[in-house]
Image: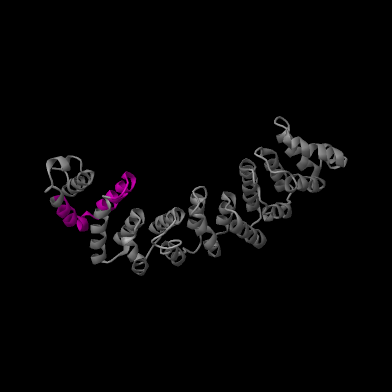
Amino acid sequence: METKSSQAFRDLPEEEIEALVQSLNSLHEGELGVDMLVACGERAVPLLRRFLIDGKPSGIFVPRQRAVRALTELGAKDVLLDYLRLDRTIPDPVAAQGEEAVKNTAARALSAWPTEEVYQVLRGSLRHHRLVGALETLGEFRRPEAVPELVAALEDDFCRSSAEEALRKLDEAPHSALINAARSPEPSGTRETPSSRSRRRSVLRLLESLQLLADDWTRIAALLYDRDPEIAARAGAIALRVGDLPNKHLAVKRLIELLTTSNWLLQGEIQEWLEKCLDIALPSIREEIERRQSESAAMQAHDHVLRILLALRRKAQGPK
């Protein structure tokens, strides 16, 4: 039943509704303004639309985020879609960052409407600008057609974790698309950009978490000798999971080689991978220990890789 107070809001003159819209700019009254505008009903939608879409981008973005919240509660999906479709150049970096925050809020709000139109607009927005909110909402659709946009977003440091999570949610594991992405350095293998390397590393991490088959390994086997140590190491980890015995032995040797050129974090992961298959890895570990112990005592004292290998050998021997 509609109360007298809610009816009073619905009967407000337009100029008073406009005053409520402007109150969204207030530090103290802005949150209350959202509730009062929602109480005004559909009559508030055109004024909120103008505030959101025609408003000047600014580093102070909370007022327009409030407008998005009010429009969402009023069911104004079309306004939010029109806003996401906007593609304007904003020279001021602070204002551009503020606009991105508002668009992320709008994209997240659209998760309330899991429709085909929303899905297509979200995909389209990602082709123009990578938005964390759009990636998060797109992931909720769990549709494999969005893989190209999600994989492309893996190149962006700010979007990578959201894109990875969206890819993990897909109803059909996109093995083939991810394998193709892992094998595609841009613009080429000899002149690969840092963002392309980041994308391929992320793809290999995703592939590690999927249920892969031996045939999948054969398609990425060449990555075992990639120029990037992390990409090569993750290919080796996949070989240890799904490769046949000769390929597992090959991967072990390559992982031991990569210990020398890897950073400490990747060295720790390689150590864990080798530890999980010590029965296969131990002969190569012993061989490398013997080679390194032939060096001078001074060199051995500073040989971090030797310490890792000795720790693995002790692990294989078990407690004495």
| Residue 68 falls in image quadrant | top right
Q: Nearer the viewer, residue 61 or 109?
A: 61
The question of residue 275 being in magenta is answered with yes
The question of residue 302 being in magenta is answered with no
Residue positioned 15% across, 40% down in the render: 298
Q: In this view, which residue lies farthest toward the top?
A: 28
Residue positioned 47% across, 64% down in the render: 174
Instruction: Give the left or right position of residue 58, taking residue 253 as reference.
Output: right
Instruction: Give the left or right position of residue 311, taking residue 232 as reference.
Output: left
Stretch of the chain drawn in magenta: 261-289
Residue positioned 18% across, 56% down in the render: 284
Q: Position of residue 53 (x, y in %)?
A: 73, 48
Q: Quadrant of the C terminus?
A: top left
| Placement of 259 over or under 98, stated as above or below | below
Please tell me whether the stretch drawn in magenta is mainly helix, strand or loop. Answer: helix
Does the image show residue 243? Answer: yes
